[in-house]
Image: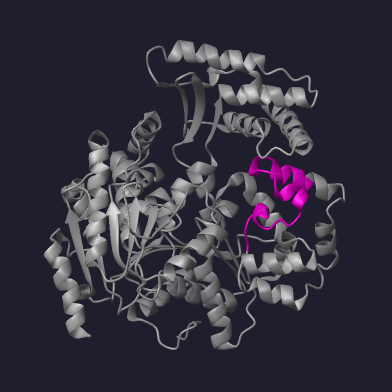
Amino acid sequence: MKFLSRYGKLRAVQSEMMVDIYSALSNGKSILANAPTGTGKTDAAIGAALTYAMEHDLSLFFLTPKTSQHRIAVEALSGIRKANGMDIGFVDFVGKSNLCINGEVSSLGRDAFYGACDAKVKAGKCSYFNKARDMSMDVPENLFEASLEGHNSLLNASRSKGVCAYEISSFLAKKAKVVIADYAHLLNPYTKSTFMKKISGSLSNAVIIWDEAHNILGSASGYLSSSLSLNMLESAQKELQAVDSKIDLGYLKFAVERTAQKKLRAKKEAFAGIEDLPEELVKDGRNLSEQLEKAGLEYSEKTRAKRSSLIRLSRFITAWQDSDESVARIISKEGKQVRITLGCLYPEKSVSVFKEAYANVFMSATLVPLRMYAELFGIGDAECKDYKGSFPQKNRVSLIDDSVTTRYENRSVEQYRKIAARLMTLKGRVPGNVAVFFPSFALLDDVYRYMSDVVVFRQRPEMKSSALEELLCRFRKSDDSLLFGVMGGSLSEGVDYSGNVIKCIAVVGVPLEKPNLELSAKIEYYEKRFEGRGNSYAYTIPAVIRAVQAAGRAIRSETDRAVIVFMDSRYRWNIYSSLIRNSMPEMEVFDIKKIDRFWAAEKETA
């Protein structure tokens, strides 16, 4: 069978994947596909799913954890259009705040932006929206062409026309065969219905491709989690006073302080119950939440504040009302700061979307064990396929450096200096760029301050997609630099470093989640739900997956060559090494001579 593709010739593993995906869809079943990085999963999934969708009049969604990961799907679909001479409509759909050109609201923080935007639109006071609405039946050709290059191109073209890029994107999505979007558009139950209504879409006749599918549960849990602090309450009360509101939050502050005194004593954190906050939050929470949100929007417009504590409090109250046994209610204290956190242990409300769709394609380079994910996603009847890489093993050397560790009890200036020295040694023995991935931004910064005489392109927290694209563009043009990012972040997953731009990857530390009450509750919840597999499912496996994902960024084609170094003594422990060997069976103990021989062999071949 001939599948849609942008390439004349496919790799064997791509052909195999396409046949399996098409077969699963033909049987109305979802499929989980685990395939090594660089094997062309995106092209295979889009090619097979799009072929089936066009034959059976279905729509197609391609969803990623982060906006920065849309690019690879945009390129694949653009290539299919050109290679096959087909007018396949697709749109790179992102959140409204990323596409706003109205200076009166675009400067607002996310807390206030959406409400302020809606208010302005409903009042007919946004000229950009009005102009876009007037041309909805006839979107100019240049805006349509710009949309095919991604959301940033559409934003620039819309700015030049003075129209709302989000509305243009929504008009195009209604007619598009394929919609590229973030997980949040379908996994977040608070935004899913709004999104589907906006694009006039239906999931019952849609195939959904979930890229980097190992991230699904973590992302979905984040959408269903929330928190409240004493500082937030005090700030919210000040905001109420600023807009002359009569609402008094004193009773809620008193309840939080009383719960802290009762529950914490000498402890830093403890579980809280639904009864620990006033009954009003359950009985009349919706009404209170709406009042607080309305006051928050009024405050934001009046003061031009980036954030609103009232709006965040409103969302917490909604989440408190909706919380059940799958949510851990935890009260904690650090210094004088008291906080109540609602931590989602398992996102039941989110994963239900899988059963709404015609079928799903879940893909990742670390979707292992496959049956674990099928169980976690609640689709035990799905097809599970594990594909082997076609790239020569001689093109990669994988090493474990046990001379350093990032274990919390071993962290010190001396250890940071040692890690930095190791990275400098690697940099000196590698003929090209080196990418380094850390468990957290804090550790990244601790090591970064001891790097010297080398160019480092450093990822920072909260970087927008445009800033990340610019950072990556500058890094790709370099051939003698370091890239610093975090595991599980935008630079370590879903980014295609083509052209062998990375010659070495150092995975520094094991990205284990920090032990706390929420993690303990999650492990216990998983133990009950998944028959004793709580620690593996909730703690160990997710950490190794983040590490392997980061390690897989270098080898993207049959000719790419790279050194992979796992820098932490714990990677020699069987609990971690056995999982890593599923992707890198040739792992050895670190020896600088092995690296020298590896690159010497390349010179001889050349």
Question: Measured from the top left, where is residue 172 in percent x and y?
Answer: 71, 68
Question: Measured from the top left, where is residue 79 in percent x and y?
Answer: 53, 81
Question: Measured from the top left, where is residue 342 in percent x and y?
Answer: 51, 31
Magenta highlight: main SS: helix
The answer to whether any part of residue 538 appears in the image is yes
Residue 116 in magenta stretch: yes
Please tell me in which quadrant of the rendered image residue 224 appears.
Answer: top right
**Along the line of sight, the residue nearer the viewer: 468 or 261:** 468
Start and end of the magenta stretch? Answer: 93-118
**Along the line of sight, the residue nearer the viewer: 602 or 368:** 602
Task: Kindly identify the residue that appears in the image at 75 percent across and 78 percent down.
Answer: 141
Please tell me in which quadrant of the rendered image residue 436 appears.
Answer: bottom left
Q: In which quarter of the image is the N terminus?
A: bottom left
- Tell me, what colour scheme is on the image? one colour
Question: Looking at the image, is 585 positioned above or below residue 515?
Answer: below
Task: Kindly identify the residue that appears in the image at 37 percent across and 13 percent down.
Answer: 266
